[in-house]
Image: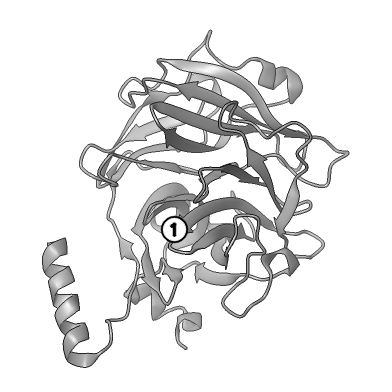
Amino acid sequence: MRRLAALLTAALVALTGCAPEAWGRDVPVTGDVLVHDPGLLLDEDGRPWVVASTGDERVGLGAIQIRVSDDGGSTWTHTGEAWTPGTEPEWVREKVQGVTNFWAPELVRRDDTTYLFYAASTFASNTSVIGLMTNDDFDPHRPSEGWQDRGEVVASTGDDNFNAIDPSVLTDADGRGWLAFGSFWGGLQLVPLDWETGKPPAGAVPVTIASRGTATNAIEAPALLRHGDYYYLFASFDSCCKGTGSSYNLNVGRASSPEGPYLDKAGNDLAAGGGTLLLETVGDRIGPGGGSVAGDWTAFHYYDGAEGGAPTLALREIAWRDGWPVIATAEEAEEMPFYVE
């Protein structure tokens, strides 16, 4: 089917000299899709395979949840949690008092090792930590087996003007690692990442790569992606976690270096309040955001108005138009006038 679509596209370009308008492809998902803050991992063929997500304090000590799709992203099964009693990173609860569950994971595959970055905090506090576990034989059907606790990656306290949650990891064109993170406070931050340890080098200082520049500075959940000659920073603006009252929306900027500056389509720096809107509330898909990107795919959550505001997994294949990602479908774009140029 994809080959046929490619041939039809090539024929259209040959006949008319222009390509058809690109829109994101919404992949209908079924099964257990009660998901918040998904971290997406692709299989060897580049298809959606595993989603890690924020834990539920009522299940498995609030551990990071794992879901797997054996059909390329359509059907999802909750196979368990990333750790069980006795294997939990107990140091986290000692460092951050009041933790009830673990948040916003990032899954990364490098060589034969799977890296699981996760966050721990409490609402309205920036006493937070990003931790790391690694697994040399990760099987999502047995998600609690094989993990090694690697400890703290980045932490913040009330003395810092950033919040160490919502990790996102990038490998640049030279094989170097980068970690973006942040929520409210001083905005989104970036530090280099040493793949030998899975942590920033000693003495690394976070640098701001995106900020709303407002009193509340409602920005969080960075997601980094390398595509073509650019690096892209996806970010969630406004508020999550309020069910049908949530106002999350997805925005993007791009840079020629992973260190930025990340500029929106109008040339505005995301570190100075810029951002190109990609997706916002349309119909019952309320407050889309809090996701991750991998290859030409993005996974995020929204609050389903038809289900009382339940956090729900969404999966999109990203389209590319003039060097910019497009997530919205053609139908959604009709309700989003910023897509009309």
Residue plotted at (74% across, 54% down) = 208
In this rendered view, identify the residue nearer to me: 319 or 230. 230
State the scheme by which the image is colored.
one colour
Q: To which quarter of the image does residue 111 belong?
A: top left
- Residue extending farthest bottom: 16
Instruction: Please determine whether, in this image, residue 62 is positioned above or below residue 327.
Output: above
Q: Which residue appears at 63% of the width and 27% of the height?
A: 100
| Of 41 and 32, the residue lying toward us | 41
Residue 106 place in picture, x, y as percent: 51, 38
In the image, residue 121 above or below residue 71? above
Count of numbered tags? 1
Q: Secondary structure at mark 1?
A: helix
Q: In the image, is residue 326 above or below residue 48?
A: below
* Side (left or right) of 47 relative to 204: left
Against 298, residue 107 (above or below) is above
Identity, as a three-letter code, of the amino acid under mark 1: Gly
Q: Residue visible at 22% across and 84% down?
A: 13
Q: Is residue 207 visible?
A: yes
Quadrant of the image containing the N terminus: bottom left
Q: Point out the residue furthest to the top here.
A: 86
Rendering coords of residue 64 (x, y %): 50, 29
At a point 75% along the width and 45% down the height, the residue shown is: 206
Whether residue 97 appears in this view of the structure is no
Left or right for 239, reference 293: right
Furthest-right residue in this view: 159
Q: Check disc 1 and report the residue beneath it.
A: 305
